Each structure stands twice: as C-alpha cells, then as structure tokens.
Amino acid sequence: MSFTLATWNINSVRLREPLVLKLLAEEKPDVLCLQECKSPMEKIPLEGLKALGYTHVIGRGQKGYNGVAIFSRLPIREVAANDYASLGHARHIAGQLENGVTIHNFYVPAGGDKPDREINEKFGQKLDYLTEMRDAFHSDNPKKSILVGDLNIAPREDDVWNHKQLLKIVSHTPIEVEHLGAAQEAGKWVDITRQDIPEGLLYSWWSYRAKDWSAADKGRRLDHIWATPDISNAAHSSRILRDARGWEQPSDHAPVFATFDL
C-alpha cells in the first residue's frame, strides 16, 4: 500500500479547524498528525473531519496546552502514549496501521527562552524529555516505524536562517542538537525530509513576531518526519507546504509531508 502522511503543529485545533479542513480537502493526506492541539480529545470537532473520510482518531489532549492527535482515513489502533520525563503533559501518541507500521506523533517541549537548565526549568525538562526518548529507543529497538512531530529543534546549519546567530538561541543550541541526535541514533531513525531534500535551506516554522514573515524568511525546520531503516527507502515525495503559513489566522508552523510505499 501507498500512503501519504502529514505532520503539523496546528497551535489550537479548535481555533484553526477551518485550516485543518482546508488542508485535508486540498492535499488529501491519508494520515494527519497534529501537535499543540490545545484541547481535550472529547472537545475536538470531528464532524468535518469525518465528512472528509477521516473516521479514525487517536490522541491525548489537554485543556489549553500541548495535545497530540492522529486523524486517519486508514484504520489505526492506539499502541502507546508515553509521558517522557514524567511531566504530565500530552506530548506523545502512537498508533499502528493494519500493515503493521507504527506511527509515533511527538510534541517535544519548546524549552523556554534561556538555554540554561540552572536558571530555566523548561530547558531542563526539554533535555530530560529527549534523554528519555533516547533511552526508550535503545530499549525498544523500533522497527517498521515512522516518527513525526514538532521536535522543537532545528538540527542542521541549513535548517535555520542563520546558524551563527542562532547558536545560543533555544531550538538550535549545540546541546539540544546533541540530545536530539542521540535520540535519533538510538532508534537508528532516518531523517526522511533530508533524505529526499538533502541540500539547501529548509524551514517549517516562522515566528509570529515578523511583520512580513515570508519576506524576512527567518525560519527554522522544527517539524520532522523520520523512519526506521527497514522502511526508510520506501519513503519519497517529501515537501513542506510553506503556503499554509500564509493562510488566514495561520499556525506559525507549516505542514510537512512524506509518502511511503509499503
């Protein structure tokens, strides 16, 4: 089977329901993974989604914060929902498709403003979260799996608009990149987006603070699609839907896509 997957930090699924429906109607991914839903699961509006064929839903929600959900046209069953770093946050959900592929949807903590865990508790929580992800991947040795989500780290120099200026900015500091790399290596995850688009500047997030985000183009690639080596070669057609950042009342993130032939 062939299926297309999209991941998107929606920054409130209830506020931006029209954008979700627009994306699904126009792009027609088979599976949509959302982060920062900011809603209990029972309050997410599902009528429009179901009308478009997205009848399978799994997730974890919180009122006003965090939240991860997977909407699928393909049957999917929940297999895990982990609370890494014991934060009590809704930041992970995993489901398995009928072909045996497991999809992990993550929302890694942003980490606050100061990249110093001694003065910024949130930064320490972010590093601890990544460490527990690493340890879990070492233990689980994932196979036939896809990992997506807002990982809140732009790891490569060409994943940010200015590498040198952002070295001390949360999301691109060396310690964050090191922790993300350790988690990636522990699961032997392949960065599918960069497998398909190996060279050049590539962003999925642009700050709300920029008056003209597109002209300034000070972006970062915070949103990722990874896969285990046993299925990574089945992936293709990666892209970032930059235009979605310019939709009315947009999220500050753009959706990321990949297709898998499995």
Image (spheres, rainbow, N blue to C red):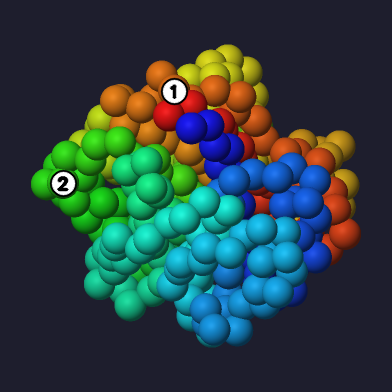
Query: On screen, 9 above or below 66?
Result: above
Under circle 1, the secondary element is: loop
Q: Residue at x 54, y 84 (%)?
A: 42
Q: Is residue 93 left or right of residue 218?
A: left
Q: CA distance from mark 1 to mark 2?
A: 22 Å
Query: On screen, 84 above or below 189?
Result: below
Q: Quadrant of residue 223?
A: top right
Foreground residue, 49 or 216? 49
Q: In the picture, which quadrant includes the C terminus?
A: top left
**Is residue 169 in view from this perspective?**
no
Foreground residue, 67 or 170? 67
Q: Identify which amino acid the numbered label 1 is placed on.
A: Ala
**Is residue 98 in view from this perspective?**
yes
Q: Most extreme residue toward the top, as rendered?
A: 199
Query: Picture coordinates of residue 138 (x, y %)?
Result: 15, 42
Residue located beneath label 2 in the image = 140
Under circle 2, the secondary element is: helix
Q: Give the mark nearer the N terminus: 1 vs 2.
A: 2
Q: Residue at x 56, y 42 (%)?
A: 5
Residue located beneath label 1 in the image = 234
Q: Identify which amino acid the numbered label 2 is placed on.
A: Asp
